[in-house]
Amino acid sequence: QQQVKQSPQSLIVQKGGISIINCAYENTAFDYFPWYQQFPGKGPALLIAIRPDVSEKKEGRFTISFNKSAKQFSLHIMDSQPGDSATYFCAASTAGNQFYFGTGTSLTVIP
Amino acid sequence: GAGVSQSPSNKVTEKGKDVELRCDPISGHTALYWYRQSLGQGLEFLIYFQGNSAPDKSGLPSDRFSAERTGGSVSTLTIQRTQQEDSAVYLCASSLGRILRTQYFGPGTRLLVL
């Protein structure tokens, strides 16, 4: 059973556009929600993370929106650039430090 | 400072052989994770070490898989009697533990079982 459901599987966005990736979860024990970016041949790298006591977190062009009641969180990439083309993973973690990852979204930003 | 390193970067083996994959975490990181990533798939949790506590082995897919962490640092993931379905990228990550959960991933070991 997939603990964290991620959509869409793939996304194509024009340069300068907004990329939006969504994740949903059921386990209310999750208390840490990171997003990772992975380039081909590399390991995932932390992009931005949020805790459930905050509804939004912004770092540069990247924003996490968190809806605790709906058990959903999303990543918004503003002014998307070709260099943002990568696979993005959402994840959720418990206080026991167990991590559950979404299935990933392949983002392509067209120049 | 050095990040998480993994070796070998690539491994080709024949079905039925045993393989050992190594992970060197960031110095001082008490938590260490192993994940498996199949082509185009997400990260599948395998095993988690936290300090001197007993490891969480709940993600290991079969008894052919085992892992150890010596001296709270280097970890080795062993796959015995490899099968073709074991072909994947094996990723290691480390973190400071429960307080700071940011995981730092290594580049992975690409395993191909022929």
Image (cartoon, rainbow, N blue to C red):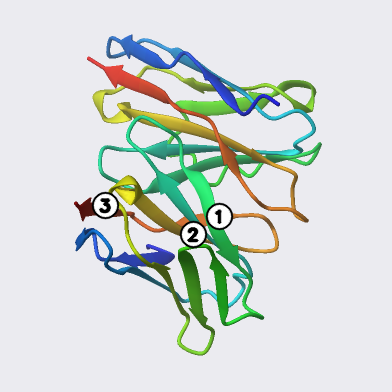
* Outermost bottom residue: A69
C-beta proximity under 8 Å, tags 3 and 2: no
Number of residues whose C-alpha sits closer than 10 Å to that of mark 2, classed few (under 14), some (14–19) or many (20 or more): many
The label nearer to you, 3 versus 1, is 3
Q: Position of residue A107 (x, y in %)?
A: 27, 54
Please check whether the numbered discs 2 and 1 fall on a single chain: yes
Mark closest to the chain's N terminus, 2 or 1:
2
Tell me the subunit letter for badge 3: A
Q: Position of residue B40 (x, y in %)?
A: 25, 43
Which residue is disc 2 drawn over? Answer: A91
For residue B14, above or below residue A55: above
> Three-letter amino acid code at disc 2?
Ala
| Depth order, front residue of A61/B82 | A61
C-beta proximity under 8 Å, tags 2 and 1: yes
For residue B86, above or below residue A22: above
Number of residues whose C-alpha sits closer than 10 Å to that of mark 1, classed few (under 14), some (14–19) or many (20 or more): many
The C terminus of chain B lies in quadrant: top left
Give the alpha-carbon distance from disc 3 to disc 2, as whole Å. Answer: 15 Å
Q: Position of residue B21 (x, y in %)?
A: 50, 18
Q: At 64% across and 71% down in the image, what residue appears?
A: A51
Which residue is disc 1 drawn over? Answer: A99
Which residue is disc 3 drawn over? Answer: A106
The label nearer to you, 3 versus 2, is 3
> Three-letter amino acid code at disc 1?
Phe
> Three-letter amino acid code at disc 3?
Ser
Q: Give the secondary structure at mark 1.
A: strand
Q: Give the secondary structure at mark 2.
A: strand
Numbered label attached to residue B78: none
Tell me the subunit letter for badge 2: A
Q: At 64% across and 50% down in the image, what residue appears?
A: B102
